[in-house]
Image (spheres, grey):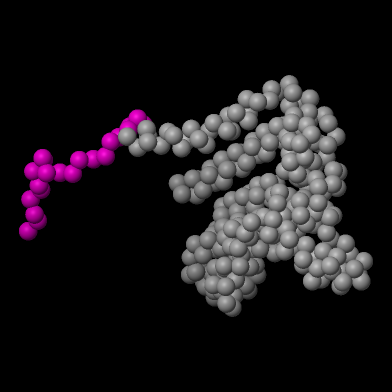
Amino acid sequence: MSQPSPPLTERPIPPERGYFNTYTLLSLPLLAFFVLPLLALVLRISLRDMLSSLSEPAITQAIRLSLTTSVTATILTVLLGTPLAYALSHHYMPFERFVDTLIDLPTVLPPAVAGVALLMAFGRRGLLGSTLETANIHIAFTQIAVILAQTFVAAPFYIKAAKIGFANVNIELEQSSALDGAHSGQVLRYVVLPLSRTALLGGAVMTWARALGEFGATIIFAGNFPGRTQTMPLAIYLGFQFNIETALTLSVILLGFSFLVLMLVKGLLQREIS
């Protein structure tokens, strides 16, 4: 026999509804703290001054170099990170917990430490330095160093997103495809990748945004040479010392890129959920 409903007065009181409730008001101080510096940055430079600064060679070179190296680092991450993410998601990787922790490490490692580590590995006096010198390969303080630094710090974003996307694919679909005669490459290409495309795209976009904003590892491993290794964050650092308009212009551009990237990723995730 079902229990009778409790009296109306004993029902739990629902939480406050509407936009202007207690929790919204308590959230305003921290939200204001987030908004105020960004708003001050945007208001500090006019559109006219920003367009005028964009004609300077140092700025155009930094933008071009940042876009080229960050896109290259993202492509490299997708090509090399997809098999790794798939192996981790299906528990094919030995010492899986250690490998998974190793992948997460660059996201919490201080960027300066990452730069020193890359220099000690690929620099002239690094672990592979003599071997690279013998092959007449120079990596440190070149655009290759920029790409490697960006890949090192940004690749975990794609690998973790891809791993989650692959793990969410129903394993029975993969097994049935294999029973129908598809080999592992076909299963990955025609079943797993299409079903994981939102996670893969979101991870790739986040990787690109992180690579675009990389600073600490790049300045140590690649240096800050205008036209050669000076990316947008490095140009901001130099511009802050000598030309504040350059720093403001590039800061607003990076802010716009970051905002659009986050909106894109959130839109993709929301569409996947709905």
Looking at the rendering, which quadrant does residue 233 occupy? top right
Instruction: State the image coordinates of residue 45 (x, y, percent, origin top left).
Output: 68, 25
| Residue 201 appears anywhere in the view | no
113 on left or right of 4: right
Instruction: Name the residue rendered at 56%, 63% in the picture.
Output: 163
Instruction: State the image coordinates of residue 184 (x, y, percent, origin top left).
Output: 62, 72
Instruction: State the image coordinates of residue 17 (x, y, percent, origin top left).
Output: 30, 34
Instruction: Name the residue rendered at 56%, 40% in the picture.
Output: 263
Instruction: State the image coordinates of residue 219 (x, y, percent, origin top left).
Output: 76, 51
Quadrant in the picture for the N terminus: bottom left
Main SS, magenta residues: loop
- The residue furthest front is 241
Instruction: Name the residue rendered at 47%, 35% in the picture.
Output: 31
168 on left or right of 247: left
Magenta residue check for 14: yes
Counting labels gives 0
Instruction: Name the residue rendered at 57%, 73% in the picture.
Output: 98
| Residue 101 appears anywhere in the view | yes
268 on left or right of 247: left
* Pick the front one: 241 or 170: 241
Compared with 43, 80 (above or below) is below
Magenta segment: 1-21
Magenta residue check for 117: no
Looking at the rendering, which quadrant does residue 110 occupy? bottom right
